[in-house]
Amino acid sequence: MTKRHRIQFPKDELTSIKQDEAYFYLQESGSKRKIKFHDYDEIYQVPGLYEQVFYDRLKCTSPSKVASILEAAVKQYQNNFTELRILDLGAGNGMMGEELKKCGVSRLIGVDIIPEAYNAAIRDRPGIYDAYYVEDFTRLDKNKREEIESWQCDCMVTVAALGFGDIPTKAFLEAFDIVKSEAWVAFNIKDTFFDINNESGFSKMIRELIFSKYLEIYSIERYRHRLSIEGKPLYYFAITGWKTADVPDKFLESKGIMT
């Protein structure tokens, strides 16, 4: 049985804390440790802590939501969902992989930039992934790229990892180009990243990609991603689409987007 941890959310200045600056306290052995929500290396080292904070306390629904809309889109267009070979970008400790495995997908390849994510996935969800790579996709060498390409993935997913600097635009497009030239794509993003006034590189890249010839959108659904630390709903969009071609190297440059 997974150990229950003593966690505490800050009580003061809640309204002034931005989503990407949120934190909690972990009480252990008579001490209290402050951990930011995006300090995944620290969180993953404590078995069950990620699940308790984000799923038990904050009611995150994103892995099941993105998996379900991807499955619905694929089945609607008469493709066999169980035959998909999926690249899970920002796989973390395997929450998304576990949802996809329930659906019986053929192959599941995990990718994350930190070894703590790999260690947590192997520790908590052994056997979920056929392979799991700890790689920086902004600096992927030729041999490793060819090895990952050899899995012949025809679908790419990424969940709760976009838009706050966790996965740079260059890394996202690298993964987009590693999967087959025609492939399914499913991901989620915070609803505010669709705002035309959002000038971040990732927000611009997503908007340009969605309206480009390289991705045909099949579904966009707004849903409650999870609760904030003050108990308010945080809304995201779950998006599924069909990749029609690789994105040229100069795509971002031509749109005036910095990597």
Image (cartoon, rainbow, N blue to C red):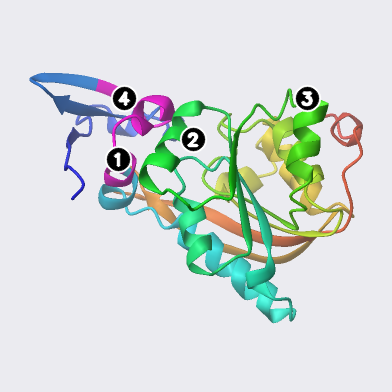
**Which residue is labeled 4 in the image?**
35
The mark that comes first in sequence, 4 or 2, is 4
Name the spot of residue 123 as percent of width and height, x first: 37, 40
User: Dots 4 and 1: beta carbons under 8 Å?
Assistant: no
The mark that comes first in sequence, 3 or 2, is 2
Q: Residues within 10 Å of mark 3 (few under 14, many from 20)?
A: few
- Please tell me which residue lies in front, 144 or 214: 144
Q: CA distance from mark 4 to mark 1?
A: 13 Å
Badge 2 element: helix
**Which residue is labeled 2 in the image?**
118
Q: CA distance from mark 3 to mark 2?
A: 19 Å
Question: Would you place residue 62 above or below residue 91 in this image?
Answer: below
**Which residue is labeled 3 in the image?**
141
Q: CA distance from mark 2 to mark 1?
A: 27 Å
Quadrant location, the C terminus: top right
Q: Residue at x 31, y 24 (%)?
A: 35
Residue 91 among those drawn in magenta: no
Name the spot of residue 229 as percent of width and height, x first: 30, 40
The mark that comes first in sequence, 4 or 1, is 4
Name the kind of residue labelled 4 in the image: Ile
Name the kind of residue labelled 3 in the image: Asp
Name the kind of residue labelled 2 in the image: Tyr
**Which residue is labeled 1 in the image?**
229
